[in-house]
Image (cartoon, grey):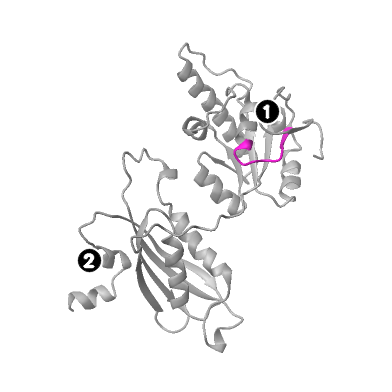
Amino acid sequence: MSSETRLAFAHPSERSAATSTDDVLDRISVRDHIVEVEIGAFQAERGVTQRVCFNIVVEVQPLVGEIDDDVDRILSYDRVTEAIQAELAVERLALLETLAARIAERILLEPQAMRVFVRIEKLDRGPGALGVEIVRARDGAPPAEIAPEPAPHPELVFLSNDAIASPHLKNWLDQLHGQGQPLILCVGASDLPPPSVAHKMAQRRIDLLAIEQNAWVLAARDERCVVVETRTELDWAMKNGQTSVWAPSKIVLDSVDPAGASPRDAVALAAWFASTFEAREMLVIGAQLPETTAVPLRAVSADQETL
């Protein structure tokens, strides 16, 4: 089999490698991502769903400097799968070619993306897979402006230790979920004092980690709660209906607009975090309110069954 024929049936990652230029580019890939979707030009394909498999390789500009194991600095795999879901949600399509071109175009709007290989295959239309594969590259011009998505307005809730231990916790979460908004929960440290050291920055890290320990305590109380520490995780969670419990260390320490509140003033710190979402208010359950905060606060007792 000639190399050209072999590459015609190779995975997009092999085609990407075989057609690479002198420019050094990194690659990320999503393999065998299967979605049930209604698509197709034939009458038999209307009103029914079929399995469609996506294989995508994105060539990206290498990062400058150290990655520092920081998910917020890279083009996340989630951005690729979100491009698939976003285009599937626009309208019903007849052609895989149309879908592939739209997905490629959306991915190339990402600042790091330089070239993208998209293979889409129908798995249920015969004994084998039927599909298309395209390659699209940025033309060298700056990426087009991405229409801004509506700013998320999550419900932010601070839970005191009494609230975390309350028998009403499940009922509160049920009520909050019923509001239909993304939900982010914040906590302070446990009632046990964290270690005390003389070094100011070390103490700050210790105090932030004490909050994170308590975040895991809350997550253990209800399986809907997932501890998250990056904006990438939070953005994904808000889009996918996940209840997040904020682990503050990374966002606080990496912020270009430093939090004015100390980790030991956990309600004020959570209010600062709420302000980064332009939250209209933050609900505080079972804790005293600080005198001034970045967003309005609404307090309820940890004894209340209804919020």
Q: Quadrant of residue 55?
A: bottom left
Q: Residue furthest front?
A: 141
Amino acid marked by disc 1 = Thr
Q: Residue furthest left?
A: 2
Check disc 2 and report its element: helix, strand or loop: helix
- Residue located at (31% from left, 39% from top): 65
Q: How far across and how far down the image is residue 98, in percent?
A: 46, 76
Does label 2 or label 1 sit earlier along the sequence? 2
Q: How far across and how far down the image is residue 64, in percent?
A: 31, 43
Q: How far across and how far down the image is residue 165, in percent?
A: 70, 31
- Residue located at (63% from left, 36% from top): 275
Quadrant in which the N terminus is drawn? bottom left
Q: Quadrant of residue 118?
A: bottom left
- Residue located at (31% from left, 68% from top): 11
Q: Is residue 140 visible?
A: yes
Quadrant in which the C terminus is drawn? top right
Amino acid marked by disc 2 = Ala
Q: Is residue 54 left or right of residue 294?
A: left
Magenta span includes 276? yes
What segment carries the magenta color? 274-284
Q: Are marks 2 and 1 in contact (CB under 8 Å)?
A: no
Cα–Cα span, label 2 and label 1 = 56 Å
Q: Which residue is mark 2?
A: 18
Q: Which mark is residue 293?
A: 1
> How many C-alpha atoms fall within 10 Å of the one at disc 2: few (<14), some, or many (≥20)?
few
Q: Is residue 39 left or right of residue 55?
A: right
Q: Residue furthest top?
A: 198
